[in-house]
Image (cartoon, grey):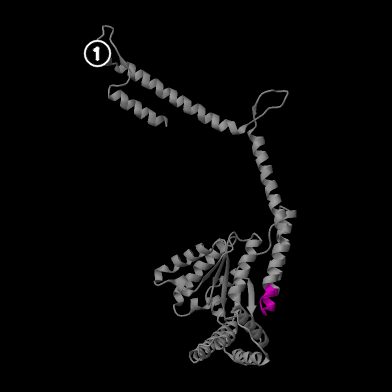
Amino acid sequence: WYLVLECQLCQMWGSGWLLLRKRTDGAAAHADPQLANAVLLGIILLLLLLKFVMDVHARVLPLQVKGTADHGHSRLLPFRRLRGRKLLSSLRVHVSRSSELMDFCAVRARLQSALDAMVGLTCVKTHLSALLDTLEMDQRRRTTAPSYVACTGCMHMVFLGNPGTGKTAVAKLIATLLRDMGILRRGQLVVAKKADLLGRYSNHVSRNTRAIIQKALGGVLLIDEAYSLVQGEAELGRECINVLVDMCYAFREDLVVILAGYTDTMTDLFAANPGLASRFPNRFSFHDYSLDELERIATLMIRAARFTVLDQPAHAALRAMIEPITREVPCGNARSVENAIAAAVRAQSTRLSARLSHVSATSSEMIEVEESL
């Protein structure tokens, strides 16, 4: 603001309206350039001095505290104030860590509730429970011993199994779990495939891979059908894997990458880069569902769609419809169950639509048709 004022004063002096002085004989007033220069220089020096005093006052005031009663005046205690800030920061960290410890029961309850809602996946549930135990004890050790160094290792994972075994649902659950535990900042799940990583042109591989990883920072990146990276355009896939290995290590504290694919085909993926297997030490095996588990999954899907399996013959028909899924190679699991239920709903819709077209407009018949719907 003082520079703006200086420019305005210069403009006034140049136009001849700054400090007019009348002659003693009553003649017309005229400008005195020497006096104008002296006054202008004095104003500038005064403004600079004022700015200097304000800057010093702004720096000193936050560091001033009241002196003791025997001194009776204020004194500067910058180091004590900084030390007080450090103490306050440490107290805040201690309170936050205590609150984290108090939330372990809530996190475990949410995890257990989500796992109970999943059908099957016994090995995966055991692995997730062990992961939660490790993370909990690691944070407790860091709270009691500040010099403790975490030994949890790398968090990147591999999901091995056929389609429809719940890999995406478990990845979303892991993202939520790590966010609640304070391991990840955001806890979002980003799902990517080969087309997203490689792009349309060969010179886009590195750029696309880095962009997707940047998008997933603070959360979980799930690369579905990761084995396809070394199929077809193998050179582009290897370039993508090289970038992925480097960035997985660089952002290992802020990102969890999950490679998902079939058990047999994932062997070729790890053979493409010698350092890839060591970057992904956590292996989850998703086994195919049994017939009873597929029937439970079908029942849950039917209830979620607001349908009802009325009687025992209907249950027998449902089981007979699902039984061929267990012989599929590879088994489609829950994905095939979902397709079978969608086909059954279409067949019912066709049957009821034909019935409605031949029904008269009497109220009793319409009520009967609505109840069958």
Q: Residue 180, percent across and down? A: 65, 62
- The kind of residue on which mark 1 rests is Ala
User: What residue is drawn where x is 68% and y is 91%?
Assistant: 312
Seen from the viewer's position, the closer of residues 322 and 217 is 322
Residue 128's image quarter?
A: bottom right
Region rendered in magenta: 115-125
**Residue on which disc 1 sits:** 28
Seen from the viewer's position, the closer of residues 88 and 265 is 88
Q: Relative to residue 267, is residue 234 drawn left or right?
A: left
Q: Residue 120, percent across and down? A: 67, 80
Q: Relative to residue 94, is residue 167 drawn left or right?
A: left
Residue 78's image quarter?
A: top right
Query: Please, is residue 3 above or below residue 192 in the view?
Result: above
Q: Find out whether residue 117 is within the magenta segment.
A: yes
State the quadrant of the C terminus. bottom right
The residue furthest top is 25
Q: Find out whether residue 275 is within the magenta segment.
A: no
Residue 207's image quarter?
A: bottom left
**Would residue 96 be seen by someone viewing this image from the given angle?**
yes
User: How dense is the environment of label 1, judged by Cα within 10 Å: few (below 14), some, or many (20 and up)?
Assistant: few
Figure disc tally: 1
User: What residue is drawn where x is 42% and y is 32%?
Assistant: 1
User: What residue is drawn where x is 69% and y is 23%?
Assistant: 72
Seen from the viewer's position, the closer of residues 21 and 306 is 306
Q: Callout 1: helix, strand or loop?
A: loop
Q: Residue 108, percent across and down? A: 71, 66
**Would residue 288 be seen by someone viewing this image from the given angle?**
no
Query: Please, is residue 372 above or below residue 228 in the view?
Result: below
